[in-house]
Image (cartoon, grey):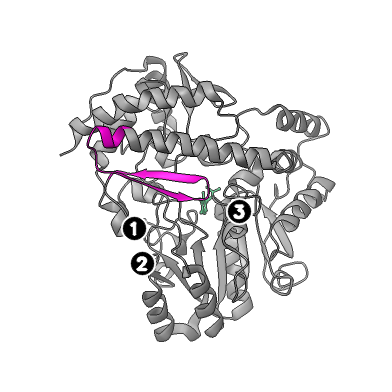
Amino acid sequence: MTAYPFDAPESAALMKRAEQVIPGGVNSPVRAFRSVGGTPRFIVSAKGPWLVDADGRRYVDLVASWGPMILGHAHPAVEEAVREAAGKGFSFGMPSENEVALAEEIVARVAPVDQVRLVSSGTEATMSAIRLARGFTGRTLVVKFAGCYHGHVDSLLASAGSGVATLALPDSAGVPADSAAETIVVPYNDVAAVEAAFAERGDQIAALITEAAAGNMGVIPPEPGFTEALRRITREHGALFISDEVMTGFRCSPAGWYGLEGPYADGAPDLFTFGKVMGGGFPAAAFGGRADIMALLAPTGPVYQAGTLSGNPVATAAGLATLRGCTPEVYDRLGVVSRTIADAAAEALTAASVPHTVQWAGSMFSVFFREGPVRSYDDAKAQDTAAFGAFFHAMLAAGVHLPPSAFEAWFVGASHDDEAVGRVVEALPGAARAAATATS
Ligand SMILES: *Cc1c(COP(=O)(O)O)cnc(C)c1O
């Protein structure tokens, strides 16, 4: 088992308190450090690329709130927008202009998206997109890929990545068998498996949903031609194609993964889901796509979907300021920071003879603790998670907070300056040596 290089008494005390009143002490499972062991750090403040924990230690943040903090924490322009919006009231329950402006910003960036409906989480976005696809097609079944995570929607928790992967739960209890039976799970990057699923039950399939580029089982980009094949197969069978860009959206490029890989000769996905970056750290997400499909939503159509806090004025102000702050320079910086850190990680792991591979989706990357290529969830699961645990704790001791799971992307922001990047680069050789000793 991993030795923890240093303890964190204040965080440990807070965790004890938390465990009394919150299941497992956390409000989202992967925060609990279960797969790496030890005490999760309670964060008291964050600025730019830095986190400060309850024990007063500073860390370079490579979690970025799991993606949203693309400009860094408490970015001045976003903070200003939030203060200004909050000064005018917190929630109206009536329409407001920020909602329109954020929708316009998304529609302007992602060409195939004619309209969006704003919601408060990525889970709500995918759940609503699935309902809309079912309403549009009059069919029930959904096809998803093993290891792709689309939030904790009942029918989408079958063989999901993210926290489900981290905890090695094949599924979730509490999901009715009928719900799970509505989902067909196929291996990622396997066109033949998709074709076989559609050949068998194509006339009952409402939608295929995929992560635009997989990021919740570590980063596994779609192989060349894979997305096009999904477009072709779904169209042939009258099913909708939903591209989940909750993680990749506005991160991989100004128009997300679609902006890197699209437009496609066979046409675009019908629906898209967004979250994370577009909320700027606040609860804002969206689903959108073809106008004729979106017209089916209430109040214009029969598919019901709603939210008391949907389009919240403070959240939309934060999202808008964040997207407007995502300039070409920001994307350039993400590329440089990612490349510098990934190259240094690969070099350190190679020097310590730790099997590994780095995989990319635009500037989004992750490190698998096994030789590559990693094409699927089965491949991802075959990595050395014990080596990762030792690596993680050595990085933490050196002041770098990685995602506490081998199945997550390492998220950087444009505020990672040379000092922050330098801290990461310096920490890597020692962490790689720690991983080498933990490898079975
Ligand atoms: C994070 C994520 C979700 C879920 O979003 P929440 O806001 O956590 O509900 C859905 N899909 C993908 C691809 C994600 O990365």
Q: Nearer the viewer, residue 89 or 99?
A: 99
Q: Which residue in the structure is indicated by mark 2?
A: 187
Asked which secondary structure carries label 3, the reply is: helix
Does the magenta segment cover residue 353?
yes
Direction from residue 8 to residue 133 in the image, left or right = right
Direction from residue 222 to residue 278 in the image, left or right = right
Bounds of the magenta span?
348-369
Task: Residue 252 in the image: state x and y as whole percent.
Answer: 57, 49
Callout 1, which amino acid?
Tyr
Which mark is first along the chain, 2 or 3? 2
Q: Which residue in the structure is indicated by mark 3?
A: 256
Which mark is first along the chain, 2 or 1? 2
Residue 411 visible in the picture: no
Q: Which residue in the structure is indicated by mark 1?
A: 377
Residue 424 visible in the picture: yes
Q: Nearer the viewer, residue 421 or 93?
A: 421
Disc 3 to disc 2, C-alpha distance: 23 Å
